[in-house]
Image: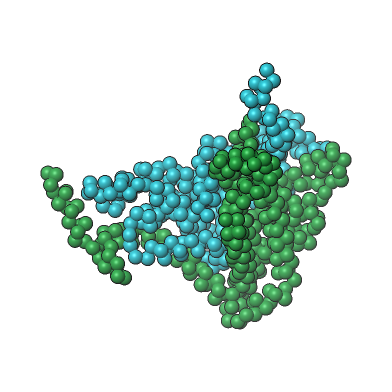
Chain colours: A cyan, B green
């Protein structure tokens, strides 16, 4: 009996490892649990000593306080709008570039690839000041275009897509050519349909990256109306005068959608992280 | 009917060729490529090439956003920065943070990946719990930690109290502020490298480990003599990205300690650049500082790739 259990339940073979991992992963999750519980606390619960972990009553007022304290919906909309446009542009531009770099032959391919690679090694902090001055001179401060356009960096997604596009067998492309497909037709009818999953993964990756973007939107916006969610939340910490329970309600509304997306797409995310690591 | 399209397709393959730089290309492929690469190129020009040229030029000027003056002052900005205490202090803070972050993050990620590589029940749940903080937005999650770190009503001091340990001032004292943010960024970021190391460990063929086991190698030896050397490419990627990412860190510091922390103890080099440029309007100085930061990152990553490459050769 005991022998059978041992082989059936692997954690019996590594009890110490199992317990250690359990403690560590509970510690990793603790902030999220704290966030959700605390978003229902009353001010009295928050300032009670010793700190109270479970709210005394389940009060939803903190959520409505978020909307009355800051233009939360506006921030949400700004974030969704800029992120969707950035992601769409990044993916379309990257698909075109990746396809022409992998499956077409033209002079200057190596040069463009090298140039693209070098953009990945120069952090935003180096280019942000001239970019700010350029945007200011074009009147793009406090506009959606000002938030969106400078953040269209495509090197990472292009390289990611290139590695997927390269896996399409040459036979398939040759067959399409024989059927009378031109370069555009091959891209639309062969390459893109056969890498749908990969394109979806790249889109997700790029979406999450744009969603959390902080430094550029902070610089380029001065009016409340154009703040994105991260910037709005940053100012909430200063304006809410440590009403922690309200901050938690705002955090729940920001984090929960992302956690839900994460639960559904974890496999794809893990795969693309692994791929970028392998490529190096 | 069918002969018409076949005549069309046969013709371009033979006729429409073009010689460029001594090589022959398909005309239609070249034309389509130009069309397809133009958007990429346009964005590269405006978000990379022009700004890079501009930042170098601006670093030799005294351009001030507030007074709108612009004169060429040669190396004065660099000289000014090298003589400035705030510059050295923020650089030191950045180096302290980066060194600790790099070491702890890499070691912890490797340790967790080794644990997860074992055949353990609930493995998927454990991996997800380490990875989840990576995906959630930075600012929202730092709001939670600002509360954790509250010396009076935060749960951290309460937990320390249960363990019989004295509380800390966390973000509110110069001796602990930097390390508090470090702890937060370890929580936030370690999962990414866990995924990388775990995939590396799982790609090691069983035959390697079986052979070592037959030779009677202990678990400890097996890891250091067989698995760790095989992970070298991933380790060096993790360190490379770690250098780049930790030297340019800004968001969590700006949210958790907007004013550079107690006695400037959490003012990092990027915070310093931000302050020079957007609080004081000293664009010239800020550009010089950004370039020095870039030079530092560049030298460190080059050095790392040299060392990394050298060690790989040793093992083979």
* B67 to B275, vertically: above or below: below
Q: Closer to the camera, A159 or A254?
A: A159
* B49 to A11, vertically: above or below: below
- The residue depicted at 70 percent of the width and 44 percent of the height is B220
Left or right of A197: which side holds B313? right
Query: Image quarter for residue B58?
Result: bottom right
Q: How far from the left and from the top, in percent, is residue B268? A: 69, 62
Q: How far from the left and from the top, in percent, is residue A280? A: 52, 55
Residue farthest toward the top in the current orientation of the protein: A1
Q: Closer to the camera, A137 or B146?
A: B146
- The residue depicted at 47 percent of the width and 57 percent of the height is A155
* A79 to A3, vertically: above or below: below
Tally of numbered discs: 0
- The residue depicted at 50 percent of the width and 41 percent of the height is A268
* B223 to B124, vertically: above or below: below
In the rendered image, is residue B67 in sight? yes
Left or right of B246: which side holds A101? left
Query: Image quarter for residue A200?
Result: top left
Q: Closer to the camera, B1 or B238?
A: B238
Q: How far from the left and from the top, in percent, is residue B94? A: 70, 61
Q: How far from the left and from the top, in percent, is residue B176? A: 79, 54
- The residue depicted at 51 percent of the width and 43 percent of the height is A271
In the rendered image, is residue B238 in sight? no
């Amino acid at each position: 009996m005991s022998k059978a259990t041992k082989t059936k339940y692997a954690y019996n073979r590594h009890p110490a490892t199992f317990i250690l991992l359990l403690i560590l992963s509970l510690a990793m999750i603790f902030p999220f649990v704290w966030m959700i519980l605390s978003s229902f606390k009353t001010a009295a619960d928050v300032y009670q000593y010793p700190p109270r972990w479970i709210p005394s009553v389940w009060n939803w007022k903190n959520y409505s306080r978020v909307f009355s304290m800051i233009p939360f919906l506006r921030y949400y909309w700004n974030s969704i709008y800029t992120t969707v446009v950035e992601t769409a542009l990044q993916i379309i531009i990257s698909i075109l570039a990746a396809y022409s770099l992998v499956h077409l032959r033209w002079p200057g391919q190596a040069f463009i690839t090298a140039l693209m690679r070098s953009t990945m090694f120069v952090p935003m902090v180096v280019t942000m000041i001239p970019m700010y001055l350029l945007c200011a001179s074009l009147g793009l401060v406090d506009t959606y275009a000002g938030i969106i356009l400078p953040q269209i960096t495509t090197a990472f997604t292009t390289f990611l897509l290139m590695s997927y596009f390269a896996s399409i067998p040459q036979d398939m492309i040759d067959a399409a050519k024989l059927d009378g497909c031109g370069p555009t037709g091959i891209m639309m009818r062969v390459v893109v349909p056969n890498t749908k999953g990969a394109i979806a993964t790249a889109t997700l990756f790029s979406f999450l990256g744009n969603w959390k973007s902080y430094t550029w939107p902070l610089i380029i916006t001065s009016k409340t109306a154009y703040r994105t969610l991260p910037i709005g939340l940053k100012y909430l910490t200063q304006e809410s005068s440590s009403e922690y329970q309200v901050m938690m309600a705002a955090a729940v509304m920001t984090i929960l959608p992302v956690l839900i997306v994460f639960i559904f797409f974890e496999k794809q995310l893990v795969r693309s992280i692994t791929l970028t690591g392998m490529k190096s | 009917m069918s002969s018409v399209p076949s005549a069309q397709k046969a013709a371009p393959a033979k006729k429409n060729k073009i010689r460029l730089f001594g090589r022959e290309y398909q005309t239609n492929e070249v034309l389509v490529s130009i069309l397809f690469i133009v958007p990429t190129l346009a964005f590269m020009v405006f978000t990379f090439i022009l700004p890079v040229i501009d930042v170098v030029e601006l670093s030799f000027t005294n351009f001030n956003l507030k007074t709108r003056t612009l004169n060429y002052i040669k190396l004065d900005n660099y000289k000014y920065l090298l003589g400035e205490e705030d510059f050295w202090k923020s650089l030191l803070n950045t180096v302290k943070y980066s060194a600790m972050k790099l070491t702890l993050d890499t070691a912890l990620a490797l340790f967790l990946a080794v644990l997860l590589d074992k055949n353990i029940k609930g493995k998927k749940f454990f991996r997800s719990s380490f990875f989840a903080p990576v995906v959630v937005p930075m600012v929202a999650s730092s709001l939670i930690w600002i509360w954790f770190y509250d010396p009076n009503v935060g749960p951290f001091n309460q937990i320390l109290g249960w363990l019989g340990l004295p509380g800390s001032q966390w973000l509110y004292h110069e001796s602990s502020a930097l390390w508090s943010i470090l702890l937060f960024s370890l929580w936030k970021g370690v999962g990414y490298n866990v995924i990388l190391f775990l995939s590396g460990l799982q790609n090691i063929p069983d035959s390697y480990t079986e052979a070592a086991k037959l030779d009677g190698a202990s678990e400890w030896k097996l890891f250091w003599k067989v698995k760790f050397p095989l992970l070298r490419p991933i380790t060096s990627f993790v360190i490379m990205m770690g250098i780049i990412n930790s030297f340019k860190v800004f968001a969590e510091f700006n949210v958790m300690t907007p004013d550079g922390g107690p006695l400037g103890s959490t003012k990092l080099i990027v915070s310093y650049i931000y302050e020079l440029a957007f609080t004081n309007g000293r664009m010239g100085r800020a550009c010089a500082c950004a370039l020095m930061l870039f030079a530092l990152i560049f030298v460190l990553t080059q050095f790392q790739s040299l060392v990394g490459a050298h060690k790989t050769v040793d093992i083979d």
